[in-house]
């Protein structure tokens, strides 16, 4: 994965963990990103911190108005981030943090909660870790902590090092800034990923049995949701297929990402906008997983720009699917569309085709 893709990952707002041996340039890269983005940055060495440095330091109050005698005071680094309305929190040497410190980091990583304060939304959390076989005094990451982050293998580029050596490792050039509206594509990515999990339900949660693998990227409901975000960002940044795949691997692991990537490329789905404009003539694929993915993608697209015409066109597509024997596949998309109904949009006659299925599933009365 190149630095372009890593920078795209950082902009997603999901904590990023860079894996690489000591002295390979992880810290220099994060410092360069901090300068490039003109963001406030703070570095916290996890290995020399106590759990209270993340969970909050208990402070006894003499006069507690609300009856709470003990409060969890935020550390100075968190206060500085709040004063600057966010920035970059760099958690260095994360793999040398003992289990007690890792446990205290769980809420910081997932909820941005430090003691009794919350870090600003515009806070990028970036970590750096050394693999167990590269240095002494390292701990395996807990599965709970690992499953909250993107895992990126940091590789050494000779050309980048030579350029950085000359420039002082302080500048980055040509990094891709995500467009302001890039998150609008997340619903479409979620619909395709949901279609894959329906096709391959064993991939929804597959925690590795060995502790070392569990301390990296692996598939879970949380990481598939993360995958939908980075997948959208990769498409918005127009990254090549290799980097797009690498970002997926950073969320759900190599095996799951490869299987999803292969499945998605074989879908050959019709564009949702085209399907809606040609609702009476659009052709349906042959495989059931393709039909479901098509219907879900059409409804996901429609929900973000719903008008009476789009509403009617979606129901026409769902009705045609039911007529072709795909009523079971159309049931969930039909419910999704029905729940998004706006005022003045009448329920079409076609919904009657789905009533028995929706009733049997307990989705409607």
Image (spheres, grey):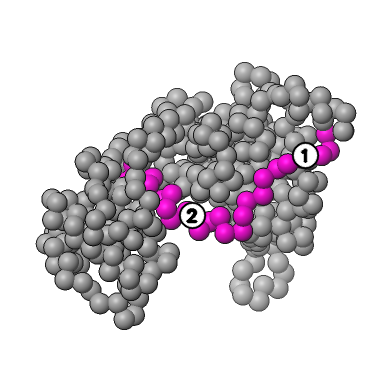
- Looking at marks 1 and 2 on the same chain, the residue that comes earlier in the sequence is marked by 1
Whether residue 289 appears in magenta in the rendering, the answer is no
What residue sits 57% from the left and 39% below the top? 239
What residue sits 45% from the left and 25% below the top? 210
Residue denoted by label 2: 185
Which part of the image, by quadrant, shows the C terminus? bottom left
Q: How many labels were placed on the picture? A: 2
Question: Could you say which disc has been placed on residue 172 in the image?
Answer: 1
Relative depth, front residue between 217 and 290: 290
Tell me which segment is drawn in magenta: 168-196
Picture quarter containing residue 163? Answer: top right
Image check: 150 left or right of 338?
Answer: right
Residue 319: % across, % down: 19, 60
What residue sits 59% from the left and 49% below the top? 12
Residue 109: % across, % down: 59, 48
Which part of the image, by quadrant, shows the N terminus? top right
Relative depth, front residue between 101 and 77: 77
Tell me, yes or no, if residue 56 can be seen here.
Answer: no
What residue sits 43% from the left and 44% below the top? 224
Q: Are marks 1 and 2 in contact (CB under 8 Å)?
A: no
Disc 1: CA contacts within 10 A as few (<14), some (14-19) or many (>=20) = some
Picture quarter containing residue 72? Answer: bottom right
Picture quarter containing residue 102? Answer: top right
Tell me, yes or no, if residue 141 can be seen here.
Answer: yes
Determine the residue located farthest toward the bottom in the rendered image. Answer: 344
215 versus 79 height, above or below? above
């Amino acid at each position: 994965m190149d630095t372009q893709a890593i920078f795209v990952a950082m902009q997603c707002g999901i904590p990023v963990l860079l894996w690489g041996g000591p002295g390979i340039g992880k810290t220099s890269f994060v410092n360069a990103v901090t300068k490039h983005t003109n963001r406030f940055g703070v570095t916290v060495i996890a290995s020399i911190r106590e759990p209270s440095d993340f969970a909050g330091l208990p402070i006894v109050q003499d006069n507690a108005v609300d009856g709470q005698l003990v409060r969890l005071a935020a550390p100075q680094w968190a206060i500085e981030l709040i004063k600057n309305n966010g920035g970059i929190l760099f958690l260095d040497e994360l793999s040398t943090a003992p289990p007690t410190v890792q446990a205290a980091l769980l809420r910081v990583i997932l909820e941005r909660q430090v003691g009794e304060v919350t870090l600003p939304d515009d806070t990028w959390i970036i970590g750096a870790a050394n693999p167990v076989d590269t240095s002494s005094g390292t701990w395996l990451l807990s599965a709970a902590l690992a499953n909250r982050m993107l895992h990126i293998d940091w590789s050494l580029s000779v050309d980048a090092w030579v350029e950085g050596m000359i420039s002082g490792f302080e500048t980055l050039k040509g990094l891709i800034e995500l467009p302001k509206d890039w998150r609008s594509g997340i619903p479409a990515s979620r619909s395709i990923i949901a279609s894959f999990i329906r096709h391959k339900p064993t991939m929804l949660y597959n925690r590795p049995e060995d502790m070392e693998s569990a301390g990296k990227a692996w598939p879970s409901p949380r990481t598939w949701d993360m995958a939908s975000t980075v997948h959208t960002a990769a498409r918005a940044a127009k990254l090549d297929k290799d980097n797009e795949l690498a970002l997926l691997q950073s969320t759900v692991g190599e095996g799951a990402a490869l299987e999803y990537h292969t499945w998605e490329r074989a879908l050959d789905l019709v564009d949702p906008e085209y399907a809606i404009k040609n609702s009476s003539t659009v052709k349906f694929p042959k495989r059931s997983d393709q039909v479901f993915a098509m219907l879900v993608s059409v409804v996901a697209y429609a929900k973000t720009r719903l008008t009476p015409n789009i509403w009617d066109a979606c129901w026409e597509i769902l009705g045609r699917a039911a007529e072709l024997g795909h009523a079971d596949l159309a049931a969930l998309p039909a419910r999704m569309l029905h729940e998004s109904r706006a005022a003045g949009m009448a329920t079409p006659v076609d919904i009657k085709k789905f009533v028995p299925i929706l009733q049997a599933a307990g989705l409607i009365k």
